[in-house]
Image: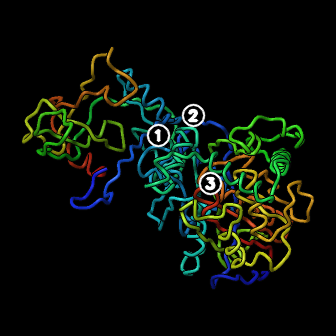
Amino acid sequence: MPAAPAPRQGRRPVAVVSFAQAPNVRRDTAHNEVELLLPVIGEVLGNLGITKDDIGFICSGSTDYLIGGPFSFVAALDAVGVWPPKSESHVEMDAAWALYEAWVRLQEGDVDTALVYGFGKSSMGDLGKILALQLDPYVMAPLWPDPVSLAALQARALLDHGLATERDFAEVAARSRRSALDNPKAQVAYDRSADDLLGEDYVVAPLRRHALPPLTDGAAAVMLAAGDRAFELCERPAWITGIDHRVETHALGARDLTSSPSTAKAAEVAGVSAGPVEVVELHAPFAPQELVLCRALGLPVDPTGAGSTSVNPSGGPLAANALMAGGLIRIGEAAARIIDGRVSRVVAHATSGPVLQQNLVAVLEGA
Amino acid sequence: MADRPGSDQVTTLDTPIRLDYHFSAGAAATPYLRGLAEGKFVGQRCPVCRKVYIPPRGSCPTDGVATEGAEVLADKGTVTTYCVVNVPFAGQSIEIPYICAQVLLDGADISFMSLIQEIPADQVRMGLRVEAVWVPPEERGPTLASVEYFRPNGEPDADYDSYKAYL
C-alpha cells in the first residue's frame, strides 16, 4: 500500500475519495431538497461500492433562509437514512466548512470515513433579499444591499485602483463558460469572445451580465476517508495535505475589497506555495473576484488562463452557483482531477459571506 | 426607535423583514397535496422496509432510498397518543380545552398530528378509533386544512399491540 503524503495540519492524513453533484439547473420545481440529494448521496457512496452503513460521521452545509423553513438540514438527513443513529453535524455555511468539520472529526481517530454534503435551491426565494440578511443587522441589512451591488462596489474598487479592467472581467467570464462546455453538470456554458461579452449592457455598473453567476438549484456530496481506509476505497485518493480558513470583519467599510487577506493567510497556512499548482478551483461567484483570489493565493493573475495553472477547469461558479454547495463543489472538482490521475497537486478555495468575507483554502495531492 | 429615559442613546431599532417564497413540494408530496384536495390521503411506500409514509417526503428516513407509488389510505385510524390543550394563546381559533393527537391512519406506518373533536376532552384515550371530517368539497384544496378534524367513528378501541410500534 502506498504511503499518504504527510499533512501540514492534523496528525492523520485524510483524503477525498469520492465526489458527486446534481445537475445544476436554474429552477428545479419537481424535487424538494431531500429528493435533490437522494441520487447525489447514492452516487457518492456507489462510486466506492459502499453503503450508508460504512459512514462514520456525517456533516452537511445548508441554510434555512433559502428554503424558508426551519431545521431543513434535519429533514435532509432522510436522504441518507440514518438508522441505526449516526454521529452527525451541520454548519449554516457552505458545505466546504462542513468538510472542514468532518476533517477535524476524522483527526480524532475513532472513525475512518465521513460523508459531507451541501444543498441549496436559489429558485424559491429572492436571493437579493435573503443574502442581505447575512450583513450586519443594525446598519447594513436594513438598507437591503443586494449581492450584485456589493460585488459591483468591489469591482469598481478594483478598476479605480488600476488592479483590473472591464476586459479582464469579460476574459474571466469567457474562459469560464468555455471551460464549462466540458462539464456536463454546468448550467451556463458558451463559446463567446470577450469582445462579444463587452457588448452587453451593465446589470449594475461596472458589472455586465457575463460577470454575474447564474441562479442555481443544486447539491453535492464528498466522501472523506482517513489513513489506510482511503487506499482501500480509492486507488488514488486526493489527500488533503493542507487546509485552513480565515474570516474578515463583517463591517464592509473596514475592509479593502480589492484584496483578500483572509485567503492569503489561509493559503500560507495550507502551504499553497510549497509546490506547483496544476489546477485551482476558485469559489469566485463574480468574475472580478477571481483576480482578487489569484493575487491572494500568489498565483499568476491571467484572466485568459494562459498560465501554467489551470483556473476553474470546471467552469467555476460562473457556470453553476449552487449556494451552500458551491464551495464543496470546488473541492470536489479539484479532487476529482487527482482521483482520475490527470494531475498531482491542486488547490481548492471556498468562500462564505458577502464579497469574499470568509475564505477556506485546501491543498490536495496524489500519493 | 426608543430612547432610554434620561439618555439620548438609541436602545432599540425596528428593522422589518419579510421574505416571500415559492415552495416546491417535490415529487412525493405533490400527489399527497393533490389527494387532500380530492378528499384522499395519499402516501408512499419504501421499497426496502415496505413502510408507508404520510405525508411522504420522497425518502425513507430509515433506509435512505426513494419511496414509491401512490398508496391511497383509509381516512380513519387510531389515536396513538394525545394531549389536552388548556392554554389560551394569541390567534387561537379553537375553543379550549381541545385535543391534539397523533393519528395513525389504517395502512400507514407513521402517525401525524391532528385535532380531535366531537368528544369531551376527558374521554379521549390511546387506541381511540377516529375518522376524518373533511371540509365541503368546494372548500378543499391541496392543504391539510381540507381536513377539519378527526372524530370518534364508533369502532371498538384498537388493541395496544396494534399501534405500540408507532409510539
Q: Amino acid at mark 1?
A: Arg
Please state which of residues A90 and A320 is positioned toward the viewer in this rendering.
Answer: A320
- Horizontally, residue B89 falls left or right of residue A165, namely left
Q: Position of residue A342 (x, y in %)?
A: 87, 64
Label 2: few (<14), some or many (≥20) within 10 Å? some
The answer to whether residue A197 is above or below residue A288 is above
Place residue B134 in its image quadrant.
Answer: top left
Residue at disc 1, secondary structure: strand
Q: Position of residue B89 (x, y in %)?
A: 17, 42
Q: Are marks 1 and 3 on the same chain?
A: no
Residue of label 3:
A325
Residue of label 1:
B45
Residue of label 2:
A29
Q: Position of residue B65 (x, y in %)?
A: 54, 48
Label 1: few (<14), some or many (≥20) within 10 Å? many
Quote the CA–CA distance across marks 1 and 2.
Answer: 22 Å
Q: Which mark is in front, 1 or 2?
A: 2
Quote the CA–CA distance across marks 1 and 3.
Answer: 30 Å
Q: Amino acid at mark 2?
A: Thr
- Horizontally, residue A77 falls left or right of residue A181, namely left
Q: Chain of mark 2?
A: A
The answer to whether residue B42 is above or below residue A101 is above
